Amino acid sequence: MIEAHDLTKRYGDKTAVDHLSFTVESGKVTGFLGPNGAGKSTTMRLILGLDRPQSGTATINGRRYADISHPLRTAGALLDAKSTHAGRSARNHLLFLAQTQGLPATRVDEMLGLVGLQDVARKRARGFSLGMSQRLGIAAALLGDPEVLLFDEPVNGLDPEGVLWIRNLMKQLAAEGRTVFVSSHLMNEMAVTADQLIVIGRGRLIADCSTQEFISRSSDKSVLVRTPDTARLAELIAAAGGKASSDDQAEVASSDGTKALAVTGLAAPRIFEIAAANGVVLHELTPRASLEEAFLELTSGSVEFGAHDTGDHPPGRGAGNHEGGHGAGDQPGHEAVAKGSAR
Ligand SMILES: Nc1ncnc2c1ncn2[C@@H]1O[C@H](COP(=O)(O)OP(=O)(O)OP(=O)(O)O)[C@@H](O)[C@H]1O
Ligand SMILES: [Mg+2]
């Protein structure tokens, strides 16, 4: 279990982490989400004792990291994949870590096999691709068979096979009863990997709840529908009290010649029923309350580094969030705090 209590970290006049409290429980994958610069990496460094907070505490299984006698056996972390000694081989890097913790060389070879680096074990880390470095970092994190794991954007640079592998690995680690705390910007990946979410913006807590609950908080729910008979379906939907508009994101007609409709105000089963009752053929029907939509909506007041607006955006999609000057607490996103409600 990881506990952060009232953590605050300032760099000069920049508050990177702002009175942040949360608990990461064992037996689950907990996703750590937030826009760029939200304070995720800083929080992870504070948990691992790599930075000192101005106030507050962070503990792993009830103890500060610095007070743990064999830290790699308690907590493993991948923070910066490129932080390995570039001149050392993958195997020597792990051997060095293993020796500091009294772990046998057999464990090193086991971990190299687990992450798929056995064939390049004797190559210098300098020549590793980002994905290979990520795998080496994951091997290092797992070396001491720790109960608690922290991964800062572990999916970065991994190929599709690697993405699937790490998803299953994290789930398996959680199923073994470990604490798995993972940051990522890949919302589709987090949606299928994380059981719980901790979402921060500008160093402050925005949400702390189950992934399902977070997604269901998105008010921007629509259903994507493709049919050869858009005009007829749009009429039927309007008659049933819904609203159908041509979809701006999926506007391009698909190969079967159908155009996409975005339907709001009616749930997916109701749209199916209406289509079936009136003999309208459907080619696709996809509910779209996604983690990405919920994330964009709930963090829209906390984006610091949004690209400048170049066109129309639906409300709450991060556009115009660089108006600046507001803390998360002044913004609508902050009202969405769902603290611990799924526990
Ligand atoms: N060592 C440091 N010195 C000065 N400022 C720092 C330092 N580390 C982080 N910051 C600042 O603290 C804020 C939070 O940064 P952090 O790296 O924790 O964000 P993040 O959520 O991990 O972002 P990203 O998604 O881009 O990785 C940023 O404004 C960053 O510039
Ligand atoms: Mg970061």
Image (cartoon, rainbow, N blue to C red):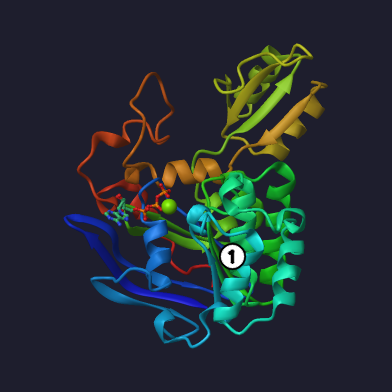
Q: In the depicted view, which residue is nearer to us: 233 or 21? A: 21
Residue drawn at (43%, 76%), measured in percent from left and top?
Answer: 3
Residue 167 falls left or right of residue 298: right
Q: What's under tag 1, amino acid-wise?
A: His
Callout 1: helix, strand or loop?
Answer: helix
Residue labelled with disc 1: 93
- The x, y position of residue 57, in whole percent, is 33, 78
Q: Reply above or below: 148 against 11.
A: below
Q: In the depicted view, which residue is nearer to us: 211 or 68? A: 68
Residue drawn at (48%, 46%), measured in percent from left and top?
Answer: 295
Residue 188, quarter of the rendered image = top right
Q: Is residue 93 visible?
A: yes
- The x, y position of residue 47, in whole percent, is 41, 71
Residue drawn at (70%, 76%), measured in percent from left and top?
Answer: 105
Q: In the depicted view, which residue is nearer to us: 185 or 44? A: 44
- For disc 1, the neighbor class at 10 Å (few under 14, some 14 to 19, many from 20) is many
